[in-house]
């Protein structure tokens, strides 16, 4: 019964906040907007910020913008185009979330169920409580169990490599060894202490890989097989896989340092995606084309449907796009850098419009995520608009995202989404 009250409160809050903003009747992507976007994307190439970049935008179920600039592979002089396949990294996460929520719709779990109900290895996790006088870890029982909701919103408490006290412990566990199965990953993770009590902080990490493990457990199928059969194939996302469908179309990966673009060695850039591995993570790993990923975003903006495919119920998409973080969760890592957002189920969710020119613009109610190599997508239900931005650059380039959104919507103070 200890989960009953929070569950009721959360459901009530969700039912209130699920009310969608009224649809806009005007068009965002005008001829002026197209010119702005072209100029912005071209400027990234001209100033050597990226090697290649492409953008695709749909508005009111129609393609209203596509263009590509620069080179997918600078050294081989291969242009960036619609057929370019890129590493989407964490844009894998929403795909995993959709797969998990399909099983939610089948009644196979409830969001406030303890994770250990389905993954018993997490039943006895402990929370790191500092070090004693001899330097040994002090551990304590969690205030409450990790719930499924926690792993959908990054509040489970799992360690990550950046933890100041236990980062090395996390790295030594080698959770993401390519030869690990998801079961082996989960077993190793369950032996590590939690960094904080479940529900008390937002901390980005391996939660979505645990979601993939849960999909595998609940469906009885290997995670990648389930996703292909129930998400990718129905949406005709035939070029979205862990191993690229055409290596000749696979973009090179670049690192920008001191104003120069340096190609990441292929041995590293293709290290995960060059062949099939035992590990099929839920948090990263998929490769995709801009048109493939647009089909995913179109399914979301259409309330779970695209063409003849019904992937989710409309109310499930709304649930995923509803903020799940209470105001008591004040520690939110770098999430505030995404704008005035909360976090739903595998998406950031915009709660307020930008309050100044230094903030990213966007419509209240939009939900989105991005990838480590600076890819980005968002779904804007108010304007019935979806956008996908593909590039392959490290380190993660937040300013590119801001400038692209400024180009789409108009800079702060000139256009109100």
Image (spheres, helix red, strand yellow):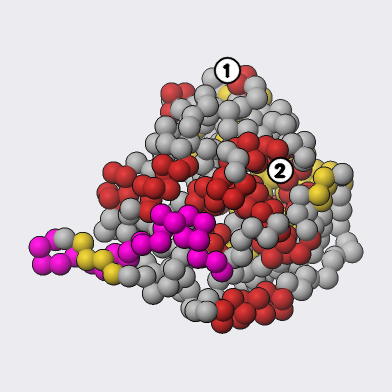
Residue drawn where x is 70% and y is 57% of the image: 106
> Badge 1: few (under 14), some or many (20 or more) residues near its Cα, within 10 Å?
few
Q: Is residue 354 left or right of residue 193?
A: right
Tell me the residue that label 2 is attached to: 231
Q: Is residue 133 left or right of residue 398?
A: left
Q: Nearer the viewer, mark 1 or mark 2?
A: 2
Q: In the image shown, does 169 or 261 lie closer to the viewer?
A: 169
Counting every numbered tag in the picture gives 2
Q: In the image shown, does 375 or 415 lie closer to the viewer?
A: 375
Residue found farthest to the right: 25
Residue drawn where x is 43% and y is 33% of the image: 178
- Magenta span includes 12: no
Residue 76, numbered circle: 1
Q: Is residue 354 left or right of residue 132?
A: right
Does 280 appear above or below 300? Answer: above
Does 14 appear above or below 237? Answer: below
Q: Position of residue 349 (x, y in %)?
A: 64, 64
Q: Check disc 2 and report its element: helix, strand or loop.
A: helix
- Magenta span includes 128: yes
Residue 122, numbered circle: none
Is residue 394 among what the camera can see?
yes
Q: Image quadrant of residue 72?
A: top right
Q: Position of residue 203 (x, y in %)?
A: 44, 61
Magenta-drawn segment? 112-135
Mark 1 touching mark 2, by CB under 8 A? no
Residue drawn where x is 54% and y is 62% of the image: 148
């Amino acid at each position: 019964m200890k989960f009953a009250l929070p569950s009721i409160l959360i459901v009530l809050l969700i039912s209130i906040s699920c009310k969608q903003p009224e649809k806009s009747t005007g068009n965002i992507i005008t001829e002026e907007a197209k010119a702005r976007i072209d100029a912005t994307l071209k400027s990234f190439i001209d100033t050597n910020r990226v090697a290649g970049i492409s953008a695709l935008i749909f508005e009111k179920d129609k393609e209203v913008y596509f263009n590509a600039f620069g080179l997918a592979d600078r050294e081989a002089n291969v242009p960036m185009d619609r057929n370019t396949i890129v590493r989407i990294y964490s844009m894998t996460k929403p795909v995993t979330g959709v797969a998990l929520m399909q099983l939610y719709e089948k009644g196979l779990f409830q969001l406030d169920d303890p994770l250990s109900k389905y993954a018993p290895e997490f039943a006895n996790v402990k929370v790191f409580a500092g070090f004693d006088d001899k330097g040994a870890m002090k551990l304590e029982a969690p205030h409450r169990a990790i719930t499924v909701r926690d792993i959908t919103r990054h509040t489970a408490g799992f360690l990550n490599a950046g933890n100041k006290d236990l980062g090395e412990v996390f790295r030594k566990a080698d959770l993401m060894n390519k030869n690990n199965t998801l079961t082996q990953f989960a077993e190793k993770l369950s032996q590590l202490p939690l960094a904080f009590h479940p529900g008390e902080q937002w901390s980005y990490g391996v939660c979505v890989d645990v979601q993939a493990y849960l999909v595998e457990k609940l469906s009885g199928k290997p995670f990648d097989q389930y996703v292909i059969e129930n998400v990718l194939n129905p949406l005709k996302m035939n070029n979205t896989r862990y191993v690229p469908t055409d290596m000749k179309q696979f973009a090179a990966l670049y690192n920008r340092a001191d104003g120069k673009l340096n190609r990441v060695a292929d041995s590293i850039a293709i290290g995960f995606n060059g062949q099939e591995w035992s590990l099929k993570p839920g948090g990263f790993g998929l490769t995709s084309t801009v048109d493939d990923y647009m089909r995913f975003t179109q399914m979301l903006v259409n309330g779970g449907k695209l063409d003849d495919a019904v992937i989710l119920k409309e109310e499930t998409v709304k649930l995923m796009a509803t903020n799940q973080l209470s105001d008591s969760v004040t520690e939110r890592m770098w999430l505030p850098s995404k704008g005035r957002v909360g976090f739903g189920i595998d998406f950031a969710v915009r709660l307020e419009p930008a309050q100044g020119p230094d903030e990213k613009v966007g419509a209240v109610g939009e939900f989105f995520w991005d990838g480590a190599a600076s890819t980005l997508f968002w779904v804007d239900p108010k304007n019935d608009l979806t956008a996908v931005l593909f590039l392959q650059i490290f380190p993660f380039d937040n300013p590119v995202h801001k400038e692209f959104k400024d180009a789409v919507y108009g800079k702060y103070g000139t256009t109100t989404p």
